[in-house]
Amino acid sequence: MKTSINFKAVKADSETHNFRRKTFDYIRKELTPQNEYWQEDKIADRIQKIEAYCKEKSGRKLQKNAMPVREAVVVIKEDTTMKDLHDLSLKLKQELGIKVFQIAIHKDEGHFDKESKHWKPNFHAHLVADWQDQKTGKTLKHQSFHYSKMQDLAAACLGMERGTAGSVGRLEAVEFKIQKKEQELKALEEKIDQMIAKLRSKKFNDLIVNDTNFFGVKQLKTKETIANFGNTFKLYNTELLKNSHELETKEKITAELQEETKDLKKEIAELKSKNAELLTDPDIFALEKKKYLNSMVEALKQSIRFHRFKTPQADRSDDRNLLREMNEVCTEFSENNKIPFSALEQIFTVTELASSLFSLLRFGDGNDMELEYIPIQKKKKKRRIIR
């Protein structure tokens, strides 16, 4: 199954649609409870922050035609988790400066097949992102290869068309497209050659209009002949211009596809090399495992922040209440993201990290810390964060 991600300017009713704040006639209400939501900020609040930071950083107001907040629809699988999308958000931030602050997973949209009458779901997620460059205060500037990178990140983080096998498949598809474009190029070139040949052929003698006078002598009818040649040249000139434009477009597309093929071949080589290292080098394996645990901690932090956002009035002054609340957050996080609860227990064996997470739940941001190292611990039996 293939995925795709495409950012556009956020719509005025995005939050209403994404968080299902009213009913829509194109959704199945009984499936809406399967949706999942997360947000770090409201769109209006984030835009205010962006405008203030732009003024502070650049000394100028944000341009009226700027698109500081954008939204993407991402094709997902039925079992895609919120953690998968947080992983994708983290990669978008690290590699492209795109800061996702709202995520909505929709599983209640789709359509009934006209013939079979079976429901065909349209599993997708909405990612709303802050598009501000933190260095300049202006909106981020991306080029075509950055948008290509977004597709690669989405495929890798969501497990769709990922790894060596997926890349090979995509490579074959791209090469097939190149072959088709080259065939179209050849056909266009042949068509242009044919038209030029016609211009030089004797067929244009047919455009000459003669008439026989009273004495049986052929005479050229100048007016009609000129009209014939004029109309014919006008038609051929239009066709030549059209075909030349198409030819130029096809050549450009072919060049871009060839460049993409080159990048994919490089990606395949890197993946093969990385796979070999993981199988043979224990240090690299440990590093990759640490990266995975780091991403899990980051996603857990996001879940804690969202939980605080949903329950701002909860009493967290009592330690027992705080422990119970943390276990509820971790249990929900484990079930929603299909992560073994024992992996979360392992995280809480690191005293400094556990303290940071509890501080985040009790006080919110400001006492957060970066994960430096997570030691490998044995699997626990009870599903409790704190004994």
Image (cartoon, rainbow, N blue to C red):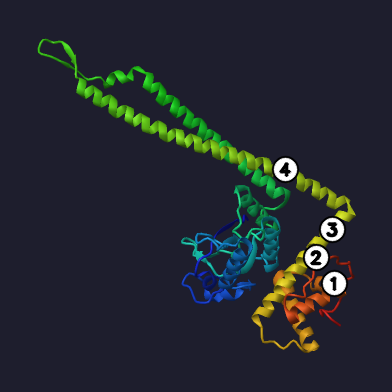
Residue under pointer 2: 293
C-beta proximity under 8 Å, tags 1 and 2: yes
The numbered mark, 1 or 2, whose residue comes first in the sequence reads: 2
Q: Quadrant of the C terminus?
A: bottom right
Q: Is residue 267 left or right of residue 145?
A: right
Measure the alpha-carbon separation of dots 1 and 2. 10 Å
Circle 2 packing at 10 Å, graded few (<14), some (14-19), many (20+), is: some
Residue 238, percent from left and from top: 37, 33
Q: Upstream in the sequence, badge 4 or badge 2?
A: 4
Looking at this view, name the residue that lies furthest to the front: 59
Question: In the depicted view, which residue is nearer to us: 290 or 383?
Answer: 290
Q: Residue at 88% across / 52% down in the picture? A: 281
Residue under label 4, please give it.
266
Q: Earlier in the sequence, mark 2 or mark 3?
A: 3
Cα distance, mark 2 to mark 3? 10 Å
Identify the residue under disc 1. 346
**Type of amino acid at the residue the image marks with label 4:** Lys
Measured as percent of width and height from the top left, residue 90 is found at: 70, 62
- The amino acid at mark 3 is Leu
Q: Is residue 113 above or below residue 151?
A: below
